[in-house]
Amino acid sequence: MKPIEARIDNFFHVLGRRDPASGSRIHSLTKAVAGKYGAQSAYNLLLRSEVVAGWRKPTLALYDHTLHLIGGGEKYGCTMASALQEKFDVTLIAHRPVTLANLMEWYDIDLSRCRVKILPLDFFDKKDPGPINPDLVSDRSENPFLAVSRESGNYDFFINNSMLEMVFPLSNISLFVCHFPERQKGSYFYVQHYRHLIYNSRYTAEWIEKKWRLSPSHHIYPPVDMEPAPGQMLAKENIILSVARFESGGSKQQAEMIAAFARLRAKAPRELQNWKLILCGGSASANPYLEKIRALLKAQPDLPIELKINIPLNELKELYARSALFWHFCGLQQSNPAHVEHFGMSTVEAMQNQCLPIVFDGGGQREIVENGISGFRFANISQLLDLTLQLIRDPGQRQRSSRAAQLRGGNFTRAIFTERVRDLFGHLAEEYASAAPLAAPAPR
């Protein structure tokens, strides 16, 4: 007997003891659904019947193929899970070992009522026990993410937080979280089969429509929770801070920051005498780009630049609190829209700490930084240098804009994110648990 058929038999075994009349009615409907739409649709009907009957709360799976790595997208998904764990039975699906304790420590959130399920994928395990790289999949190979699709059919709700378009959803309610549509439509592209498409910024929504010809449905900005505790604001020091992952391709442009800081010191040596640049971010253990950064700094030992890799959260918070200015270059001189910052969580983190941002004028940064009010945006390095020097020379302007930045950063907090997530899923769950229409799902 196939797994789905076995689960259906078990459902009716339990239902027959609890409510024989309802059992008979649902059994007839289920047989009709199975005959017309298949066993998965029949099973989905039974799953919903359990929730409608009040036997249990809805089950929800949140899938992320990079859940074992620290990142902004992963924080987005875990914060969703934390917000929903009271009303849903939540399972986090990953492919590489990771624990709830890891996730709670990395993102400083409560996931105590969730569980983690590790789903092995032989296709990747045989090729490389490290990263799960979707680029290895071609239309000449079987889709290795079929295992995730099958698993999705075990839950009432399924959230794909991976931006992994190769997972076909089988749950009753499916949601795709898009942080940016990097992949073109092609083999194993299934985003159009999700019932709801969540996007993290208007910039992302614009490119979803351009690249995929799909209309995203729900806008939820990422959660940013770097606000200092009351009375914990530290005195600002002469620090320009950058916080960004050291991507192997150098998309965050830390090398360009080193060159810009050297130019700034040459342009105004007196004003920059007591200023330093701190490059902070996460990195994999083997990272050629990070080694390039180390080599650049070694070749210029007189530059007051510090490198901080994979530091703990409390140290990062202290850096934000102490730093006066914040640089973000992602998108500079890039023609590929995927290489422009899609939102900019670290920019908001800086703003929440009155660390004044000077960021590239593009992508999601335009939705965060009000140019000339809560920060400054630049189009080229010359503008960056002029703006930075202007703010160094005018502490009064810097302080006024920093306070405006902190107010602006309050629009992107975890509390606001949690409220929006609970509101969306509250409406979906209420509709799902209503008795009507309790019928077959639409054919796929």
Image (tube, helix red, strand yellow):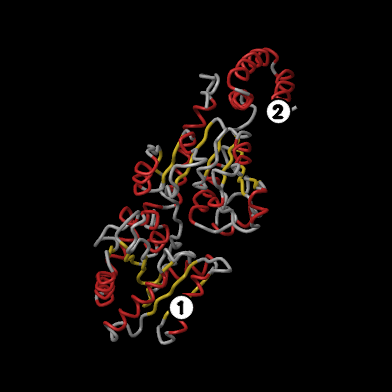
Can residue 260 be spotted in the picture?
A: yes
Can residue 118 be spotted in the picture?
A: no
- Three-letter code, disc 2: Arg
- Measured as percent of width and height from the top left, residue 20 is found at 70, 14
Tell me which residue sits at (55%, 35%) in the image.
169
- In space, the residues marked 1 and 2 are separated at their CA atoms by 58 Å
- Measured as percent of width and height from the top left, residue 135 is found at 53, 52
Characterize the local packing of mark 2: few (<14), some (14-19) or many (20 or more) Cα atoms within 10 angstroms: some
**Which of the labelled discs sits on residue 275, or is there none?**
none
Q: Quadrant of residue 34?
A: top right
- The reply to whether the C-beta atoms of the residues labelled 1 and 2 are less than 8 Å apart is no
**Which of the labelled discs sits on residue 306, or is there none?**
1
Characterize the local packing of mark 1: few (<14), some (14-19) or many (20 or more) Cα atoms within 10 angstroms: few
Judging from the image, what secondary structure is the residue with disc 2 in?
helix
- Measured as percent of width and height from the top left, residue 136 is found at 56, 52
Judging from the image, what secondary structure is the residue with disc 1 in?
strand
Q: Looking at the image, which is closer to me, 46 or 263?
A: 263
Tell me which residue sits at (44%, 72%) in the image.
279
**Which residue matches tag 2?**
7
